[in-house]
Amino acid sequence: MTAMTDDELNLLTTLRRDLHRTPELAFEEERTAEKVCRVLDEAGIAYERGLGRTGVVATLRAGSGDKAIALRADFDALAIAETTNLEYRSQNPGVMHACGHDGHTTMLAGAARALAKSKSFDGTVHFIFQPAEERGVGAAAMIDDGLFDRFAADAVYSMHNMPWLPAGQFATRAGPIMAAEDNFEIRISGRGGHAAMPHHTKDALVTAAAVVTELQTIVSRAVDPLEGAVVSCTQLETDGAPNVIASHTVIRGDARSFCPAVSELIEQRMKAIVAGLCAAHGAEFTLDYTRVFAPTINTPAETDRAAAAARAVAGADNVDADCAPMMASEDFAAMLREKPGNYIFIGNAAPDGKGSTMLHNPAYDFNDDIIPLGVAYWVALVERELSAG
Ligand SMILES: [Zn+2]
Ligand SMILES: [Zn+2]
């Protein structure tokens, strides 16, 4: 691993803090894309803009190999009001890089610059700078714009910082690493009426209460205990009042799972439970079940190579190649449905506590000290995947 020069580290740290200062929400990342392109221009790297509206894809070729891989970073921010007192804190009120996507973008741009200079590979590398990850729609938007038709790749890789993993370490696993997220909305209609005369009503709230309780049996009684799954009812609205029995209720919630068959089972059981209980209570219903994020599933061969690249730059003791999966979701899943590949976590937490604040917290900050390691990982991965001999 070649050490990064002070000048290069300064340039990348400046980029990271500049991105942090001017965060932008999903599909509004115009200035963010512009800043990335300036840093690519400065190194003479070609790119195309406008995939998935604001996305950027840079490409490097070396040697005569016909193998191609794609590396992906996300670059959108969150609707969170930053509470840090950092000199480079967000200047865009109510918007914040609270997931470290500013750091991901910087490390990928740094890798493109390093590989443009070294040309230490044989084949093609595409560097994908993706919008709108937090809304779960950016990866799909780029794919719909022909991402993998225009930029052919044999495999695709991504990396996310992790505040509870010490800086200097990596963690990944073959198979599911992040969960699918499904959302549901159940609308129940009965017949409202006077609170003192319930026998003239079909109480939509009592029906909804039965539904909420019975939905708890999906995970406890229907899903295989060895599969991970969550069904959470998170909202309950009625049109009732203290002296008015509700005519209508709405239940909303969120379901997580790691495999499509479990997601299907949750939806089927939910339909059966809602239909049965509404029939029993004389109520009507509609159920909208939407799949927001697919599960993020790493393929074994690419995960082996990602772990080997991580070991090469961090040392074997600092790489967990069989970490526990997480119940949170990630829209890189959409790219892994198209191509084999790997999603890896890079530790963000310094011993003094820097970088250990949880993702999506208003006090979160990406740890700039991990930039050289993140860049080195990308370079090592490319050199392994597209070996120059
Ligand atoms: Zn996030
Ligand atoms: Zn994120």
Image (cartoon, rainbow, N blue to C red):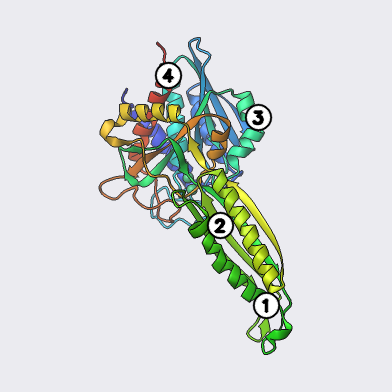
Badge 4 marks a residue whose secondary structure is: helix
Residue 182 location (% of width, % of height):
58, 52
Q: Which residue is depicted at the point 62% across and 65% down?
A: 251
* Circle nearer the viewer, 4 or 1: 1
Are dots 4 and 1 in contact, CB under 8 Å?
no
Can residue 327 be seen in the rendering of this structure? Answer: yes
> As shown in the figure, which amino acid type bears the numbered disc 3?
Gly
Q: Position of residue 330 (x, y in %)?
A: 51, 44
Residue under label 3? 146
Task: Please report contact status of discs 3 and 1: CB closer than 8 Å, yes or no.
Answer: no
Q: Indicate the amino acid at tag 4.
A: Lys
| 206 shown above or below 316 | below
Of marks 3 and 2, which one's residue comes earlier in the chain? 3
Earlier-in-chain disc, 2 versus 1: 1
Which label number is shown at residue 254?
2
- Residue at which label 1 appears: 203
Q: Locate the C terminus by quadrant.
A: top left
* Mark 2 crowdedness (10 Å alpha carbons): few <14, some 14-19, many ≥20: some
Q: Are marks 3 and 4 in contact (CB under 8 Å)?
A: no
Q: Considering only order in the chain, which callout, 4 or 3, is on the residue closer to the N terminus?
A: 4
Q: Is label 2 in a helix, a strand or a loop?
A: strand
Query: Residue 26 versus residue 385: which sits nearer the camera?
Result: 385
Q: Nearer the viewer, residue 176 or 338?
A: 176
Q: Secondary structure at mark 3?
A: loop
The numbered mark, 4 or 1, whose residue comes first in the sequence reads 4
Q: Which residue is mark 4?
A: 117
Q: Closer to the observer: label 3 or label 1?
A: 1
Q: Give the distance between the C-alpha atoms of the residues marked 4 and 1, in whole angstroms.
A: 70 Å
* Structural crowding at the residue carrying mark 3, measured as other residues with C-alpha within 10 Å and reported as few (<14), some (14–19) or many (≥20): some
